[in-house]
Amino acid sequence: MREADFQSWSYEALAREFKEAVDFVCRRVVNREEVVEQAFCALVTGEHLLLQSRTGVGKSLLAEQIFCLFSGARVFRVQASKEQQPDTYFGAVDIEELKRGRIIHNIEGSIVDCEFAFIDEIFDANDFTLRALLSVLNERQLMRGVQNVPAKLHTVIAATNYLRVSDITEAILDRFLYKAVILPDKEPYIQYKIAQQFLLHGGKPASPPRTIPFALLRYVHTIVTGQDAERHITIRPELIYFANLVIRYYEVLRNRALREHYRGSTPPIDYYISPRTQAKSLNLLRTIALLHGRGEVCPEDISKLYFIFATVGIPEEVELFRKAYTTVANSLHASNGFEQVRLLLAFQSLLEELQRDRSLLFRPLSSLAQSPLRRTFLDWLKETFGGADHTVEQNKRLLEQFLRDFVPACEEVRELKLSLERELAHFLRSLE
């Protein structure tokens, strides 16, 4: 099947395909529902997942059970070791080319030539080999010597029993947007259910009743990453702002926890969320909406962003994110803050429009009303001044007066107002 074959499917139909797959894996891999949901988010967003646990907990089974659900995709498998060289991953070096001084890998069947990959004990690989993997993991490009080849690689699931710290391993960790720690299950009932599955399948992946075409995975991937020209999963501006507030507060809480752990001394490294990771969280939000059969992100979806900002399986990190989400949400809900954020972002949208086309200042600002929001800056203009014609100078004063009259209901809104005051002042100075 081709990606075009799925264009007529509803969001509910797309979600149903993946829900059945998630349910199947959860039945097969006992008591791992959260990690399974996280893994499918990694697949849909086209990112990589790192699984850490002690030996014998089922990391390999989980990865293999997920990969066998997809038809039309090849899986590259490797057990990492210190002795391996990059050709283990990229294919053997062409000897004739090497005699000419050129490093050319025969990539057929390599990680470059497969859609999925499972790397077991990834940190057993030496730093030289890990460094060679960086461009394939991030840019999906093999760059070795004169060879520059696009990789077909969609998602890697890697497993490890331990974390090894070096400059290269930190770079590798950065390529794995999703991380999970799997703890052993000692509860007798859970052990009984695991034993039942072992008796049925002997510790190997079970054949699914039906598979998902890889083309379908590629299709939903283009939707959630904003590459599809026809279908879009919308995120309202106030939800993007809300998500950023939650992420920032979570970063504060993580660093506060680090300082408390080190009893007032400076931690060896602070917790940092890069702008790249923060931007990619929007893809996760759209994925969560799609997997629930929706074409629009809702506020509750933001609570699942811990899939990338926390390590699933470490309760302290997950709880800190939930605390950040709940604290910010309660602050905005209790004070009508969401409505105020909508209003200020509508003002910001108008300001951007004026910056792009300064000739609009020569028109009555009330004539620019196109916002679907219930009460926008332009509504305020109409109600306050009746939409009468204004000169450029009067329009400037109106813009300033709107922010001057605006009374923030909470600290988060006050901060947004101050940012807009600075942006407006910069814009008005540029007109002089």
Image (spheres, grey):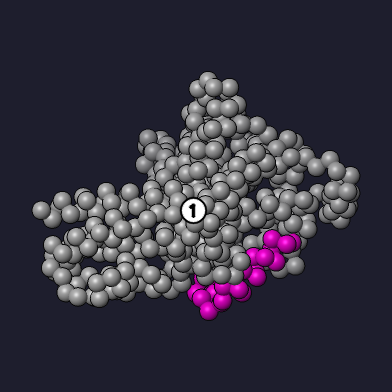
Q: Residue at x 19, y 75 (%)?
A: 388
Residue 180 vertical placement versus 207 (above, below): above
Q: Which segment is the magenta one?
A: 1-24
Question: Predominant secondary structure in magenta?
Answer: helix
Q: Quadrant of residue 292?
A: bottom right
Q: Residue furthest top?
A: 265
Residue 350 vertical placement versus 168 (above, below): below
Classify mark 1: helix, strand or loop.
helix
Q: Residue at x 73, y 57 (%)?
A: 25
Give 245 or 385, whichever is nearer the viewer: 385
The reply to whether the magenta stretch includes residue 401 is no
Q: Is residue 80 left or right of residue 53?
A: left
Q: Label 1 is placed on what type of residue?
A: Ala
Location of mark 1 (residue): 243
The reply to whether the magenta stretch includes residue 6 is yes
Near mark 1 (Cα within 10 A), the count class, few <14, some 14-19 or many ≥20, is many
Give 244 or 292, whichever is nearer the viewer: 244
Q: Quadrant of residue 188?
A: top right
Give 337 or 263, whichever is nearer the viewer: 337
Q: Quadrant of residue 71?
A: bottom right
Q: Is residue 238 left or right of residue 347?
A: right
Q: Residue at x 88, y 48 (%)?
A: 189
Whole-percent x, y for residue 135 in the image: 44, 43
Res. 44 visible in picture: no
Whole-percent x, y for residue 128 in the image: 50, 30
Quadrant of the snapshot with the N terminus: bottom right
Residue 284 vertical placement versus 374 (above, below): above
Whole-percent x, y for residue 81 in the image: 62, 32
Whole-percent x, y for residue 6 in the image: 54, 74
